[in-house]
Image (tube, helix red, strand yellow):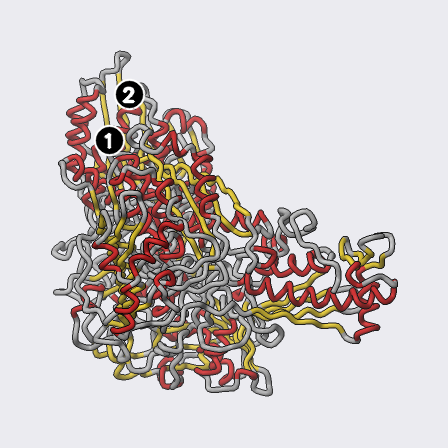
Amino acid sequence: MSHREYSSDTFRIIGKPRVRIDALSKVTGQTLFADDISLPRMLHCKLLRSSLPHALIETVDVSRASAHPGVQLVLTGEDFPVEYGILPVSQDERPLCRDKVRFVGDPVAAVIACDEQTACEALSLIDVSYQPLPTIATVAEALQATEAPLQNYAEEHNIHRRLAYSFGDVDEALAQADHVFEDTFLYEGNTHMAMEQHASVAATDPDGRVTLWSSTQCPHYVHRALAKALEMPAAHIRVIACPNGGGFGGKTDPFNHEIVVTKASMLLGRPVKICLTRQEVFYCHRGRHQVTMKFRTGVNNDGKLTGMHLQTLLDGGAYGSYGIASTFYTTALQPVTYQLPRYSWEACRVFTNKPPSGPKRGHGTPQPRFGQEVQLDKIAEKLQIDPAKLRLGMIAPANSLTCNFLKVGTIGLAECIDRVVSRSGWKDKHKKLPRGRGVGLACGAYMSGAGTAIYWNKMPHSGVQIKLDRSGAVTVYCGATDVGQGSDDVLVSLVTEVLGIETIDVKCVTGDTDLTPVDLGSYSSRVTLMMGNAAIEAAERARDLIASAVAEKLEIAVDHIGFAERLVFDVEDPNRNMTFQQAVICAEEKHGTMATTGSYAPPKSAARFPGGGVGPSPTYSYTAAVAEVEVDEASGVVEVTRIYIAHDIGRSLNPVQVEGQVIGGVYMGVGEALMEESGSRRLPPKLSDALVHDNPSMLEYKTLTMHDMPEVCVDIIENPDPNGPFGAKEVGQGPLLPIMPAIANAIFDAVGVRVDEVPITPVKVLKALEMQAAGHDARVGPKAFPNIEWPQAMFVLPPWEGGDGKASNRPERKRAAKMHTMDKVKGASEQT
Amino acid sequence: MMRLPPFRYIAPTSVSEAAKILKEEGPCAMLVAGGTDLLANMKRGQQTPEILISLSNIKSLHDVSNSSGLTLGAGLTLGSLLENDSIRDSHTGLWQAAGVVATPLLRNTATIGGNICLDTRCSYYNQNEDWRKAINNCLKKDGDTCWVATTSKTCRAVSSTDTAPALISLGARVRLVSADAERIVEMKDLYQDDGANYLQRHSNEVLTEVILEPLVGWRSTYWKLRRRGSFDFPILSVAAAVQTDGGGTIEDARIVLGAVSSLPLLSTEATEFLVGKKLDDDVIEETGHIMAKLAKPRGNTDLTPIWRKKMVPSFVNHALRELRGDDVRELRKRIAHQARG
């Protein structure tokens, strides 16, 4: 084994602020995105979308469209007999609807023509006759309606799924608490708003193999969906993920348009392209679920939590998408941020006639994080404890298990809180600023990669191959996809570091199912950690092969061989060296053709109960933020003047990129806090059954402009985590989490009103101020959580009560466990 | 992407030629200046002209003359208007209004004439064709229900021009030229209370210039309410101009509300109330209430109509305080998201 010493002192690339490898080609407009691809003889596709929110399709007559000059092919649902979907448990989508449409925007037919304009013209020549069905516009309607359910696999009517878990006896924990706080919150749904609209190009070769270039975060999952939906061997399909102009979760599902152009290209033997309009991107959606939440939390006078009962209700829209996972995520990560001795939760997802909800940055976690962080602010207020101190007293020990058997690694939350408290001048500002100005604090935690794949398998989650040859060039291959987050830069920098060369010497090939080993995709903040560990393994194997050859040639002990500055040398006497290229030649002479691999699979989860696959991660990142706001009392307009944020990243691989991700998360968070909302519009039911997207345009779906963006003061907390590549944890999603509640809490500090809803619009703030002025409870938010009949909870004893990670629904096990329960709970809370 | 439907494009070099083509081609032709609104609307099928007559090549439409008063060619871009320091000094409200239209990129192309004639807007109308089909269209285009006011026989789309309220407050007039005639119309009379047919301009007329009289003793301002610091159309605006004598007594005043009706609303009651008074706190407060009575916002823009109506008094307050000489720059930046002016 070659000489290895990785530390901040010896890193040449890692931890140094660098211009990322793809920056120049992006800022000079040379990066090829999917919509930039143009192939000879290429045709263009447009989709006809449903104009009704819910209806049976009676007939689709394409004869006039097919006859339109320039039209090559018209496809309908009849051409696609096989259903698909991202999760094995919800294979409920078709590339084109066959029997039924479920929202305005559901695709019904596709036209492939010589150009986009001709295809658009032909869409208006397709005659569809529908039989309308009742419109389900809201979660309340979905819970009540018993006729014509949207999906026939729903658990009951329009209830997609109800889940209930109990980690210890929470009723008892609440009964014995000094205080029980009960709060309901509403988090409106919102969407990703990536700059790039989805685009795809498919081309078929003469032997019948097909290639799809697409703006996707998950080429591997698209590959699987294509094989299934087109009923052909995956080996004959190649999916190439183009660089994405942003994803944020909006490009993690396999999409109908991807399957349609692939099929069309195979039928026509010509390349077929589609580029969605912005409105169609709103129809693809898969954005943040609207979630109604109710928290019942037990707290003792000293500010320690005794237990929590959480209920969530999700508006799923018309399809499953990642919905079951999203539903679990509205609850599963709650015990990661702070220690929670006992925890029970119930969650329910319903179907409505709207574009399907799915994963957006933070996937299911920002909603309950908002709820808990605002509730903690209320608890701190009531118990007269400083909100920062309250949270500092609730941090779990590193490397421990949560009550729901998630294994947390390093925890830098205390450092994060300390940093934002001191940098923001929190102690001089909280409760001390003049009315109208305020500060608020909140925290969050997020996983560095989902511990479980979308489909059950025992294979690696990420694979990396490295090829080296006598030219001295290194090429690294990985199925990961750069969606703008900079994963190509991470890949190249890790290999560069290990081999002691420069980033320009390393080429990377990513996101191509023909050329690259599988990586599951750019979601769940998994790429840096999983791809990174695989890349280090592959690079170290290459390094060892080279070192053994050089050791032989220069007669040096192999463990004295070092790599740096494009030289391979004796660490005791660096003058004894050869260039990296000469070293690779030596290695090729000794070992033959040079290639190495690395692979990564997450550690096994401690959770052994059904459903325990959602939440485990190799490690978790932590974040704390302080928001400073000014509230105009005449209008309710909130200006966020500054955000202080500290993020525990383990190790920062490229500080420029890390800071960029943090600021990007803040940008999205301030937008979600103040304005983002993917609403729908129901016309007066007496006059119309219409239910349309409220604001499917970049003008009316409000996100921050640069004028609205506050100053952001970023601190990066480094404490390398043994599970991360060189200690790195995630940064793509975590920094978003504390922003929304920090702003809500700052508004309370400024003017004493609570808006228990997101977005916090000036309309809501003014309403709360008016209630305050009238002497009423100055709160805007949902009044109650709807009545839902829950299934019996799956009972799992927390580790400190003797639990082994298995469900124990047998009464005698529960009873036996309960006998020594309370002593252990006491023991656990004393430890912290 | 969204594609423009096919159309014929003619770019005459004189107003008379443009007016002649407009007369000959009739209703299937439309004038286009900067095209920043019209071309986007055409992609969505809101307007479906077969012929576009461009005004871009008519040199005289880009002129500014300030011999006696100020005459602005209708083709002057908002960007070049903003570079004109004398407009900023003499007609501050107009300059401020032009500075908060859309975004810098759009202002470099959009013209003053185009903004005056800007199509009224409505969240049931400014949508793609297939979206509008999903609500069975609306009174403004292809349908027979005004979805924001289902009992209304008239379209309630919102006047969303920033410059018109400012120009009305400054007493501006516009010149309208047709193939056979020419007339000058007061800006305050250019609009009518029908969102589908909001201009008094005849379809055969070209709006060629904006005429502003010399303003002695006048001060003006423009306050725009919108969600964000750029890009957004107004959801309420207040254009205020007052003429005072040396002692601060008001000799004349024009207060105009934008974006809370199908046309900009000039309040004669406010003028009558203000003349002879000084801008003290009580007078300002009362003016706010007078203006609020006039506003008729509806649920077809961003945020709620009740809130927008509530905002009228405070925006009138901010505007009049600014004219009185209070330092409201911070407030302007924070509440109205107006960095300029």
- Quadrant for residue B246, please give it: top left
Residue occupying the point 18% across, 37% down: A772
The residue under label 2 is B324
Find numbered disc 2 in the image and state the secondary structure of the residue it sits on. helix
Above or below, A9 relative to A523: above
Q: Which image quadrant: the C terminus of chain B? A: top left
Task: Provide the chain ID for the residue under circle 2.
Answer: B
Locate residue B149 relative to residue A36 in the image: left or right. Answer: left
The answer for how far apart the CA atoms under marks 1 and 2 are is: 12 Å
Whether residue A167 can be seen here: yes
Above or below, B94 relative to A92: above
Residue B90 spot, x, y in % from top left:
38, 25
Residue B180 spot, x, y in % from top left:
31, 46
Whether residue A314 can be seen here: no
Label 1, residues with CA under 10 Å away: few <14, some 14-19, many ≥20:
many
Q: Nearer the viewer, residue A230 or B52?
A: A230
Label at residue B316: 1
Amino acid type of the residue tagged 1 in the rendering? Val
Find numbered disc 1 in the image and state the secondary structure of the residue it sits on. helix
Q: How many marks?
A: 2
